[in-house]
Image: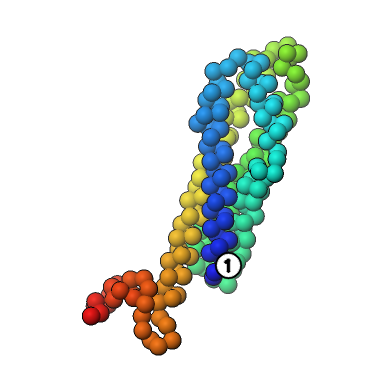
Amino acid sequence: MRKQLAVTWVAVVLLGLIAGFFYAYACSVMVGLAETDDRTFIATMQAINANVRNAGFAVSFFGALAVTALAALLGLRRWRSPATILLVLAAVTYGVGGLALTMGVSVPLNEELAAAGAPDAIADPARVRAAYEGPWVTWNLVRAIASTVALGLAAAALHKLGHRKVEARVVDGGGEERGGLRGAGMAPGRPVQQ
């Protein structure tokens, strides 16, 4: 259980990073770029897309799914536990709504924009921008929402695991209770110990 708790903590951090990445695009980057002219928009997105595939991005983008799935696998012996179920749901939600959506929709859109060539040489930049911007912004919002939902599910699993760890420490070898509500004599359904 200790390993699952530690790995889930890392999963929450990675999901938070990638959800924040998509959120930042949704509420600032694309909003700001919407105010630019067509050639500036195209040049900026081409530059971002050419440089976003880096080690810092890869750790959160791929790591979020890998570590969340690992946390779920570590709970296989207790596969019906709420924490493990939440982790499976988090992995599936991010895997489909974050990673698969990026690879299946966002990356092809980025590749089409790159194939349009240098912004100064594009005959109709308004058409190129229109074909890219609307779909990219819409699907990025879906990625942001899915990643945030996955983050919430993983955080709920972390809470459950942490709570379960406290309960596991309640009874020691001498039969005395310590830690948590029970250690304070305030367990549900039990009178206060004096």
In the picture, which quadrant includes the N terminus?
bottom right
The answer to whether one can see residue 165 in this image is: yes
Seen at 69% across and 26% down, the residue is: 46
- What x and y, as percent, mark residue 89? 54, 55
Relative to 172, residue 96 above or below: above
**Is 27 or 173 nearer to us in this picture?**
173
Seen at 51% across and 55% down, the residue is: 154
Relative to 70, residue 144 above or below: above
Within-10-Å neighbours for mark 1: few <14, some 14–19, many 20+: few
Relative to 5, residue 168 above or below: below
Residue farthest bottom in this picture: 174
Q: Answer left or right for 2 relative to 171.
A: right
Residue farthest top in this picture: 123
- What x and y, as percent, mark residue 136? 61, 30
In the picture, which quadrant includes the C terminus?
bottom left
- What x and y, as percent, mark residue 58? 67, 45
Going by the numbered disc 1, the residue's amino acid type is Lys
Q: Is mark 1 on a helix, strand or loop?
A: helix
Seen at 33% across and 71% down, the residue is: 181
**Is 182 or 85 nearer to us in this picture?**
182
**Is 168 or 172 nearer to us in this picture?**
172
Residue 101 location, quadrant: top right
Colour option used: rainbow
Please give the residue where the numbered disc 1 appears in the rendered image: 3
Residue 132 location, quadrant: top right
Seen at 50% across and 31% down, the residue is: 27
How many labels were placed on the picture?
A: 1
The answer to whether one can see residue 147 in this image is: no
- What x and y, as percent, mark residue 71? 59, 61
